[in-house]
Amino acid sequence: MARVVQKFGGSSVADAESIKRVARRIVATRNDGHEVCVVISAMGDTTDDLLDLAKQISPNPPGRELDMLLTAGERMSAALLAMAIHDQGATAVSYTGSQAGVITTAAHGNARIIDITPGRIEKSLTQGDIVIVAGFQGVAQDTKDVTTLGRGASDTTAVALAAALGAAYCEIYTDVDGVFTADPRLVPSARRIPHICYEEMLELAANGAKVLHLRCVEYARREHVPVHVRSSFSDQPGTWVADVTEEPGGTMEAALITGVAHDLSEAKITVVGVPDQVGKAARVFNALGEADINIDMIVQNASVSDATTAITFTLPDADRPTAIEALRAIQAEIGFQDIIYNDQIGKVSVIGVGMRSHPGVTARFFTALAEAGVNIGMIATSEIRISVVVDEADVPAAVRAAHTAFGLDSESGEAVVYAGTGR
Ligand code: ASP
Ligand code: MG
């Protein structure tokens, strides 16, 4: 008997039938003798629909009220799931994030978990009840207001609860069979990765792979929670995210590249005609930092004859207006000429701990891009990742070319996308 946390995403509970199906799976786990704590997302596209509704009421709704609204989505699915479980003869009790003891900062829309006080969950589990917790929400320590943890953060709720409850592992049920070598929606020959280490999973999540929330992976790594990402539509084994990639005693040589990630959510800004003087770049990035903008890649061109330089960086496209405003405010002071931007870009990254010990990975990646006719706009690397910025229209070709070049294609075409709009 083990204590386990199971999380089901919105596409797994999109309608009444799906909720009953998920309930059957949960009851089966309970009947196997396990203590089960379930974290649930809002049904289907509920969160998007609620956001759309709020926008129709007000262009800029107060964060506190938006969180009151959005947390209702998870509360609905939690209660419905508990009802479905009762109907199948087991006992279940649903809790909001606040009731479950998820204590957060007061940053509405993007709160962080500070502490978990799972007293009520513990009590219910000990009584033999299945516990259902509404994902992606908590209560602020100071203000006592209800908060949300950011889009997709039910994964984070699940891993945080698994750590707090001392669960043996955390299962993340989703609409694909696990973590794939590339997005199966883009690369039909993508393969399921059976085991992946936290480090690689972090890079995948940070560079556009949407299967797991980035903060969930950070949390899992810090607390050493093994995470099993798998489909709620099948009984196939999924992907184990844990400390080691290889099974004990395994003889398989680690792959050079574990996966290819892509990200269409960024934009590129170039600050043109920046005087080539000490402190100008610092001033540019201070202004962006003060505006709370997360910068990704940065390139500064060599000075040209007029003693100016151009600074190009990428950032989330959603932050572009704020960034441009912050830069305009210091244009006269810095004395740069102009700001130009491009939001029709995409980032393609190859990721693998294998590249630490193998030269030539960059050459192979760039050759594949060249043969696919893809032009590289920007380049960035970490110890286990190479990323390029390309035209948005070139992203599918670039991902497929890299996937093939590193021998990741499967012959059988095993990738199945069971549900979800990918919205
Ligand atoms: N329902 C929330 C969202 O759509 C949280 C989640 O699904 O993880 O972002
Ligand atoms: Mg999700």
Image: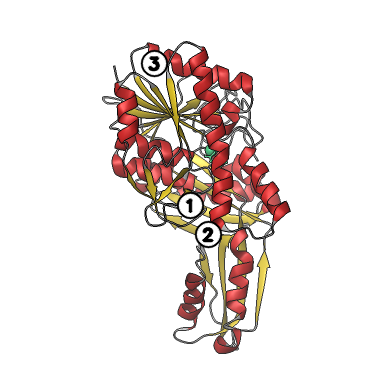
Q: Which residue is mark 2?
A: 379
- Camera-side residue: 419 or 259? 419
SS for tag 1? strand
* Badge 3 element: helix
Classify mark 3: residues with Cα within 10 Å, few (<14), some (14-19) or many (20+): many
Amino acid, disc 2: Ile
Q: Residue at x 51, y 76 (%)?
A: 287
Name the spot of residue 191 as percent of width and height, x first. 53, 29
Mark 2 secondary-structure assignment: strand
- Rendered image quadrant of residue 16: top right
Kind of residue at badge 1: Ile
Could you say which disc has been placed on residue 30 in the image?
3
For the residues labelled 1 and 2, the Cα–Cα distance comes to 7 Å
Q: Residue furthest right?
A: 56
Badge 1: how crowded within 10 Å, few (<14), some, or many (20+)? some
Tell me if residue 71 comes above or below residue 304 in the rendering. above
Between circles 2 and 3, the one closer to the viewer is 3
Disc 3 and disc 1 in contact, CB within 8 angstroms: no
The residue to which callout 1 is attached is 386
Q: Residue at x 48, y 26 (%)?
A: 230
Above or below for 189 versus 323: above
